[in-house]
Image (cartoon, coloured by chain):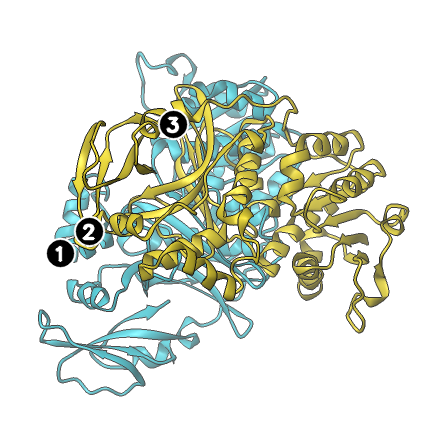
Chain colours: A cyan, B yellow
């Protein structure tokens, strides 16, 4: 019998309890042992629910309970999640989290504490929800020099961009619609400004190169600047605009950024629509592989959490090595990386950059648009009045 | 130092040697030890090549060499591959193979022999080339009742179908073109009749349910019956025709088949074009996840082989459990599974099935086409003169 405590009975926590209950036999077969939720921490009451009798409001009830083998942290945020997780690891309990903020801020330290205490700290669900991406990156794509990781890592912004593309609508009303439908939060900042995918690409890049990438050092542009004109030009070019969380090697330097990208149908992420997520990984031998699925949602995310629980339950007294060295990785200055760009300018603006293709649209007579040759970020940023998006 | 011998210096074998040489440092970092190719078996000579000095024509040079830790079998076919692999496992050497025919025919026995000898038998590259799918299926998607696995598992047929779709061409000339371009073999039977994806879906289904699925019991239809009329009707419906290797649960019964499928843009496999492969896995909690990449090719396939070598090198005296019970899984009678269908009939034929949508095309006045309601395979097969394709 393996005993699990769940910190936080919200969307994901209740999903974890549900997955463990509904797929009990399957989980048991994979684990070789029964997994039982014995404690749930939440400040709220859940009268009449299945967890009523195992609910506690006091974290110490879990920290002090030696019968708890694995703790699932699904509260979100860094406080008190960090303190709770640290305490659990130090007391010899393995931890599974879905909390990207926690991993992006404290990953190396918590991985080290887990190793020192011969337990495990796992976080498959922290990126891409139910999509298996962290374990494949750590355990499968191991023979390659990783040249690029690019992901559609945020369902809210992908939903908005898909709707703007399909309906020709502007950003603001589309955001309001997404909020009304429950696809965007009342305060949508973390999504639309790209802070959410920024933490996720920091985690993936840290794992790909075995060294901590500080999300605060990643250049981060959201989608608030995308206009219906940009989308219309993209459409006329046979392309789409997606919000990419991305890291890539150029001349041996690793760059990372969150920024809108313009991609054509030949790109593996072109067909990723609505709230779906996907991550493309490019290896020097492998070429492109891509992982696709639901990037959020109670049960898909809980499925990934439970897959981590199963691994930890099978290795209760053995640390499975995850390399994420605490010394920060030095990222290249993104303004020095080169790319081709989509550029939109006022009709009469001067063009001072290499042009590969020019486009005008009757619906937007006030603009002209261009596809450029290779330029650095600094060069394109210096073009006055230009709205620009990287071609990927 | 971990010593590797390679059986077969063809496309994949030479790729393995190349990946290990080019990414030597990365492989070493992941393994924690150096991996060295010390023997290569091939009947041919390779004068002047890098492996000239370690080449042997005699398998016993490898079998008898106690310094060889891991043997890579990339010869293909079941004889003598089976005997060679069995001998190596019995002599305490771990084996990596990319050989789907070997795994589909002898998987459970070789997995057992590896376990009995405390070594490993791994075969990530046997399905989907470089795409990580076997390890994710075994180690990541473990919290779910797997409801469906559907894959575009054969690049040759996907290339042909993509070309027929884009150019409106017929099957035969497109096949000839694929042969001229090197995308189809001189004898294309294994691809176009679906025998290749049949072995692959047998392997995936065996792993998903932990029990041997005999590929000879899987209903297998290739793409030779697909006409340009079918493609034109599909296009008019906003759909594409893809060759699916598929297994799925219906009312608790597992069915498996290889057959053309008609899918719309909402299907995760719709955008998989040309020689690319992809596998969709549906879990009862997870929903759909999808894995995409190069399903063949020297370096992508070799990358997957080397990722297996790395795992085996890290566990030289420890068997990592893979469950594939030898008792055959009883598959449902595919003619009793239900589906909606695309049906093409001569213009004047009688319609004796439930119709949801009807279509005619000026370019093909001799036909009419229908989308049906739910029917069994037996019911649709009984419709005389009908060409039909499952809607997925």
Question: Residue at position x 14%, y 54% from top?
Answer: A167
Front one among A36 and B209: B209
Q: Are marks 1 and 3 in contact (CB under 8 Å)?
A: no
Camera-nearest label, 1 or 3: 1
Seen from the viewer's position, the closer of residues B371 and B369 is B369
Q: Position of residue A238 (x, y in %)?
A: 26, 65
Q: Is residue A108 visible?
A: no
Residue A74 image-quadrant placement: top left
Q: Could you tell me which chain the residue with mark 3 belongs to?
A: A
Residue A15 — which label? Answer: 3
* Callout 2 and callout 3 share a chain: yes
- From the top left corner, tell me how far across and down residue B329 is, in percent: 56, 23
Q: Is residue B32 above or below residue B316?
A: below
Labels 2, 3: front one: 2
**In x, y percent, where is residue A34?**
56, 18
What is the chain letter for disc 2?
Answer: A
N-terminal label among 2 and 1: 2
Residue under mark 1: which chain is it in?
A
- Mark 3 falls on what kind of element? helix
Which residue occupies 46% across, 43% down?
B222
Q: Residue tagged by mark 1?
A: A169
Q: For marks 2 and 1, give the CA distance.
A: 7 Å
Image side of residue A328 versus residue B315, left or right: left
Mark 2 lies on a secondary structure that is: helix
Kindly report the distance in space between the C-alpha atoms of the residues bearing marks 1 and 3.
Answer: 34 Å
Label number found at residue A163: 2
């Amino acid at each position: 019998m393996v005993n699990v405590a769940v910190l936080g009975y919200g969307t994901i926590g209740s999903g974890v309890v549900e997955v463990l209950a509904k797929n009990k036999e399957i989980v048991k077969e994979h684990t070789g042992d029964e997994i039982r939720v014995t404690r749930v921490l939440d400040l709220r009451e859940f009268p009449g629910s299945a967890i009523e009798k195992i609910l506690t409001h006091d974290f110490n009830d879990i920290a002090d309970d030696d019968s708890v083998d694995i703790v699932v942290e699904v509260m979100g945020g860094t406080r008190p999640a960090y303190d709770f997780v640290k305490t659990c690891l130090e007391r010899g309990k393995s931890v599974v989290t879905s909390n990207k903020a926690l991993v992006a801020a404290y990953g190396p330290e918590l991985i080290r504490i887990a190793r020192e205490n011969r337990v495990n700290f796992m976080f498959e669900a922290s990126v891409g929800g139910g999509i298996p991406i962290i374990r494949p990156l750590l355990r499968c794509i191991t023979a390659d020099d990783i040249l690029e990781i690019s992901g559609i890592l945020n369902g809210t912004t992908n939903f908005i961009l898909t709707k703007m593309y399909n309906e020709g609508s502007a950003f603001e009303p589309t955001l309001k619609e997404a909020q009304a439908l429950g696809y965007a939060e009342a305060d949508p900042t973390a999504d639309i400004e790209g802070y959410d995918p920024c933490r996720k690409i920091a985690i993936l890049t840290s794992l790909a190169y075995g060294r901590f990438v500080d999300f605060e050092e990643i250049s981060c542009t959201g989608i608030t600047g995308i206009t219906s004109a940009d989308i219309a030009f993209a459409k006329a070019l046979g392309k789409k605009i997606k919000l990419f969380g991305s890291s890539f090697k150029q001349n041996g330097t690793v760059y990372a950024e969150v920024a809108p990208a313009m991609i054509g149908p030949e790109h593996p992420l072109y067909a990723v629509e609505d709230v779906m997520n996907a991550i493309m990984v490019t290896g020097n031998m492998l070429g492109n592989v891509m992982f696709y699925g639901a990037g959020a949602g109670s049960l898909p995310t809980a499925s990934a959490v439970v897959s981590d629980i199963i691994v930890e339950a099978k290795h209760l007294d053995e640390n499975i090595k995850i390399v994420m060295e605490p010394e920060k990785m030095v990222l290249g200055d993104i303004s020095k990386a080169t790319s081709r760009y989509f550029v939109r300018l006022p009709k009469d603006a001067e063009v001072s950059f290499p042009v590969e293709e020019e486009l005008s649209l009757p619906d937007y007579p006030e603009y002209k648009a261009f596809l450029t040759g290779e330029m650095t970020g600094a060069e394109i940023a210096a073009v006055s009045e230009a709205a620009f998006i990287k071609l990927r």
